[in-house]
Amino acid sequence: MIKGYDPYLVALSVVIASLGGYTGFSLTARIRSGPGADPRVLLSGAAGILAVGIWTMHFVGMMAAPLPADAVYLVLPTIISFLICALVVGISLFFVSIGDPSPRRVIPSALLLGAGIASMHYVGMHGLAGSFGLTHDPALVALSVGIAIIAAYGGLRIFLARQDGLRLAISAIAFGIAVSGMHYTAMLGMHVAPPGEGHHHAAGLAASPQALAIVVAVLCFVVAAGFLLSLVPDRRQPETAPAVAEPAPQLAPEPVAPPAAVEPPVEAPTPSRIIAAPLGGIGQPPRIAAARLPLEGANGTHFIDAGDVRSVRADAHYTRVHDGTRERMCPWSISEAEAQLDPGRFIRVHRSHIVAIEHVTFVGKEGEGAIIELDGPSKPRVPVSRAKVAEVKARLGLRRPA
């Protein structure tokens, strides 16, 4: 059993794990919150920074332990431990970054994340060589893996509940507990055998603890820098871009109903309302605009008022509905959503995006098109295609329609 840890390095290892967790979860939250950087880049960055946080925490914890003086670290197992961790963590984050956060997604993700933490630890321990042997207590091995999985599940559930700053911080702390709890529980079950009892000398390229300390110090800086960068708000607002002080009212005239048209019935029991057919549509049945949208959840189908919808984003054959706080899956396709929603309140600004024009709080130029920001706690941002810029500005009262 390893005893006599350096308390300062132990505390540093927990902080590094938590900072890595916050940065990784923050990048993952940007994937779920809507458009922005390439999701593949964000996913790769999140997996990489989480793996670096886990790997760095492990070796800071190893340096905190009073290991034998002749201990060295084999380079190949050390690198393999990092690669395994990055791959497994990346797969885990992929599962939670897409689709509805149901237990069918979160439980496998927590299992993979816990397995990634455990695999990194024990493969890394296999790279420890010297004139001594290492044995592990099977019960504490199982307990350490269980701690990693349970704490990872708790962190993911907190993170997926609501991706604001406080929840991200709590998730990061839970992640730090998952990594450090697994590590120190496993170290509690590790026994250093005297020389001659199953020891193995360094075979192949090895690194001294001093060289590893330099590498770990650099990675600690990388994790801390990534954490600080994740705190920078993603609000790219050019100075020349006109800002909208408040949601613009609808100025477009209502379509004139034919003489025979009657007022729509009171919509007490039904989730839809009737809109009179526009000119040129006489003789066609009136269009039904949905007052509520269905959302698929873990326990069934829920409904959200159309007035609470900020944006609708295409996701394969389905869509993702953003309510200003988070995205949830809707069984409608983007074309079906466009046909169901009130065109007086919603506009398709991109082939993959529909927005509620009344919730727009900012519009600015981005590339050949534009970017708009919607109100709500998370302030979702949506791209506008070049062909739709003029129409969007006209609907916002910024430019006369052609």
Image: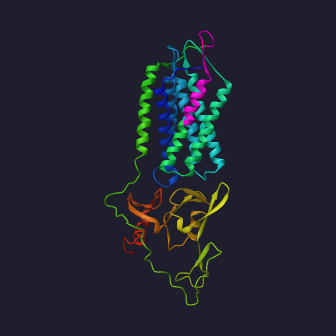
Q: Is residue 95 left or right of residue 401?
A: right
Taking the spot 43% from the left edge, 41% from the top edge, the residue there is 227
The extreme left residue here reads 240
Q: Which residues are magenta?
A: 177-198
Taking the spot 59% from the left edge, 76% from the top edge, the residue there is 273
Is residue 196 inside the magenta stretch?
Answer: yes
Is residue 187 inside the magenta stretch?
Answer: yes
Name the residue nearer the viewer: 191 or 222: 191
- In the rendered image, the vertical position of residue 2 relative to residue 348, given as above or below: above
The extreme top residue here reads 196
Name the residue nearer the viewer: 39 or 92: 92
Where residue 27 sits: x, y (%)? 48, 46
- In the rendered image, the vertical position of residue 68 relative to residue 255, given as above or below: above
Name the residue nearer the viewer: 202 or 324: 324
The extreme bottom residue here reads 259
Report the quarter where the N terminus lies.
Answer: top right
Report the quarter where the C terminus lies.
Answer: bottom left
Where residue 397 sits: x, y (%)? 39, 72
Image mark count: 0
Q: Is residue 52 visible?
A: no
Where residue 237 sits: x, y (%)? 36, 57
Locate residue 296: give its quadrant.
bottom right
Q: Is residue 130 visible?
A: yes
Taking the spot 50% from the left edge, 54% from the top edge, the residue there is 33
Locate residue 124: give its quadrant.
top right
